[in-house]
Image (cartoon, grey):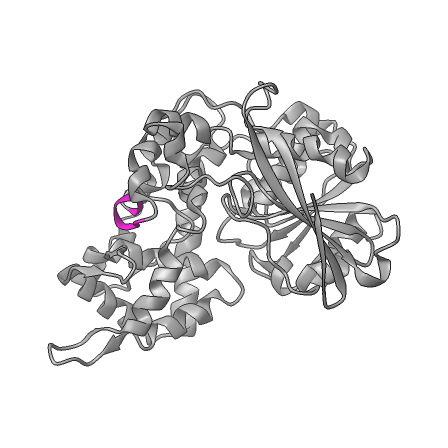
Amino acid sequence: MTDTYRQPGVVLTDRRFTVPLDHDNPAGETIELYAREVVASDKAGQDLPWLLYLQGGPGFGANRFVGKPAWLGRALENYRVLLLDQRGTGASTPANRQSLPLRGGPAGQADHLTHFRSDSIVRDCEAIRPHVTGGARWTVLGQSFGGFCAVAYLSMAPEGLDTALITGGLPSLDAHADDVYRAAYPRIERKVAAHYARYPRDVERARRIADHLLTHDVVLPNGYRFTVEAFQSLGLMLGSGDGSHRLHFLLEHAFVPTPSGPALSDAFQEEVQGLLSFAGHPLYALIHEAIYAQDARPTAWAAERVRGEFPQFDAAKALAGDEPVLFTGETIHPWMFDCDPALRPLRDTAELLAARTDWTPLYDPARLAANEVPVAAAVYHDDMYVDTAHSLATARAVRGLRTWVTDEFEHDGVRTGGPRVLDRLLALARDEV
């Protein structure tokens, strides 16, 4: 059953598909995938090639666009677009604190979640492609983690791809999670330094908030326990094009006077809880480190362990030494499963995933070295989320891959500079640059 409706300039069709939970057991349990087909209104009757969009994450459903903003308008000049809610996200069969108990206890839940990495997502794409395109190959556009999926696609099923376009999402082919975070913390520190250089008064504002959280027990309206580490994790915003500005606006009016003295304002707390909660994307926390796992080594809370190698991120020490409080970035920590009501019931499940030692490879270096699919990738200079050196090493390992390395955009360049970014990648893939 499909539903078709219109928005300004586009025709949308809801698509639903049934796929195996475990593609190695096609006769076993199934799950549902949801995707939204988008076509320009004036091309609705045309036979157009398909572009599959894979969202960043892991754990986020595809963008809910209204009309054709950002890169979508440019894509619709040439393609029908399929916006896929990857398994467990959006309107696809959910994986969250409410649904996972159907799998039994933490062990059953952890086993279930091993089927939500990029290898399973690629096999989903290949399962639905004949139903969408009639068997024709399609172009994939992968943003961030979606780019990781695109590289896995090139490794596993390149015969399904006409072209691969990747924005801020070239993963290392062999780095362990420890290597990923050991490279990440210095990048994060540079982004924080740039923020404080732009907004010098935020140094004292952040110190004041951190000091308050170290001396007060703060619980946000949604039940989130707001610790100083949670406050530091708001630095996740610093990797996006407007993130530094949004963080500044958040900090500048954090306190309000009360009869008992200064307190964190209701408005500040309301905004913070929306930024910190994983209720809408729990897979981001649950399997984030697992997207880097490819062998018998456990991830073992890599971001938390590696953070210990960078004592400058210790807020208490920063305050004692009259130093700036450093924010953190795209790192997942065990304390998040204590602080966030959406994650608390899943703490034991997360521990089992962190200890797991039977991860399978996600990429095939030999197949990538023989690649014949046109591939173009935007690599953002000093990207806070994906290490540039790792990305460029992978670019050299994929035969024929062409890169556009730019400092014009941050990690979300496909959003902020969509038409230009997509134009450039299409030209590179077609060997027009």
Q: Nearer the viewer, residue 153 or 386?
A: 153
Query: Was residue 158 drawn as part of the magenta stretch in this picture?
Result: no
Q: Nearer the viewer, residue 252 or 280?
A: 280
Instruction: In the displayed orientation, state which residue is furthest to the right.
Output: 46
**Magenta part, dominant SS:** helix
Figure check: 2 above or below 276: above
Left or right relative to 217: residue 114:
right
- Give the percent coordinates (x, y) of residue 213: 20, 62
Left or right relative to 69: residue 28:
left
**Can residue 164 be seen in the rendering of this structure?**
no
Instruction: In the displayed orientation, state which residue is furthest to the front.
Output: 1
The boundaries of the magenta stretch are 336-341
- Give the percent coordinates (x, y) of residue 291: 49, 35
Q: Residue at the location (39% across, 30% down)?
A: 109
User: Hey, which quadrant is residue 69 in on the image?
Assistant: bottom right
Q: Residue at the location (35% across, 25% down)?
A: 107
Figure check: 360 above or below 396: above
Q: Residue at the location (40% across, 21% down)?
A: 357
Figure check: 297 above or below 278: above
**Can residue 127 be seen in the rendering of this structure?**
yes
- Give the percent coordinates (x, y) of residue 14: 67, 49
